Image: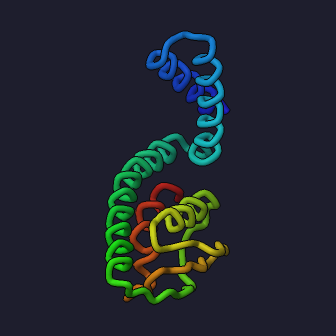
Amino acid sequence: MKGSLLLFFMLLIFWLLLSGFDYQEIMVGTAVSAVVAIIVGYGFLRGPKTKYLRGFLWFLVYVPYFIYLEAVAHLSVLKSIITGKISPVILEVDHFHTHDWGLTVLSNSITMTPGTLTLEANPDKLYVHCLNEPKDKKDIAGRMEPILRRVWR
């Protein structure tokens, strides 16, 4: 709780320094800071602080890596559109997440990547629709999962 409260005040101060001290900016900054502090507090701040910091740093590594994977997927879908070659398939993909947030971020990352859609997320398997059948179905979650496992150990 202390960590979330501290995070809230740090975010609010940062928001106000960047946007100003107008009444509307204070209201929006308070709301956004509260939502982010609650989400981060629930997802990261449980357990020892060193674990939180390590997980947060790995999450910061994951964001640019996900953007790279997203760009590669866009090019792949563009190639499929231009050539007209698609082979849609629904696959059962194994994952190794034990934390609900890790599974949620993995499922959403797969869904946000063009050409794939997570249909169902179970505690041990994901059901994913793919625009083109991959050579190895481990590539679907396997590219993102090693980093996400380090975020939520």
Left or right: residue 47 compared with residue 16: right
Label count reads 0
Q: Does residue 128 appear left or right of residue 135 in this picture?
A: right
- Which residue appears at 60% of the width and 66% of the height? 98
> Residue 125 appears in which quarter of the rendering?
bottom right
Which residue occupies the foreground of this view, 29 or 88? 88
| Of residues 38 and 73, the one drawn nearer to the viewer in this rendering | 73
User: Is residue 68 depicted above or below 121 in this figure?
Assistant: above
Q: What is the quadrant of the N terminus in the image?
A: top right
x and y percentages locating residue 31 in the rendered image:
65, 28
What is the image's colouring? rainbow
| Residue 65: x %, y % from top left | 35, 58
Q: Position of residue 53 (x, y in %)?
A: 46, 42
Residue at 43%, 47% (x, y): give it: 54
Q: Residue at x 41, y 61 (%)?
A: 147
Q: Give residue 28's quadrant in the image.
A: top right
* Residue drawn 39% across the image and 59% down it: 66
Percent position (x, y) of residue 35? 64, 36
Q: Quadrant of residue 140?
A: bottom left
Against 112, residue 76 (above or below) is: below
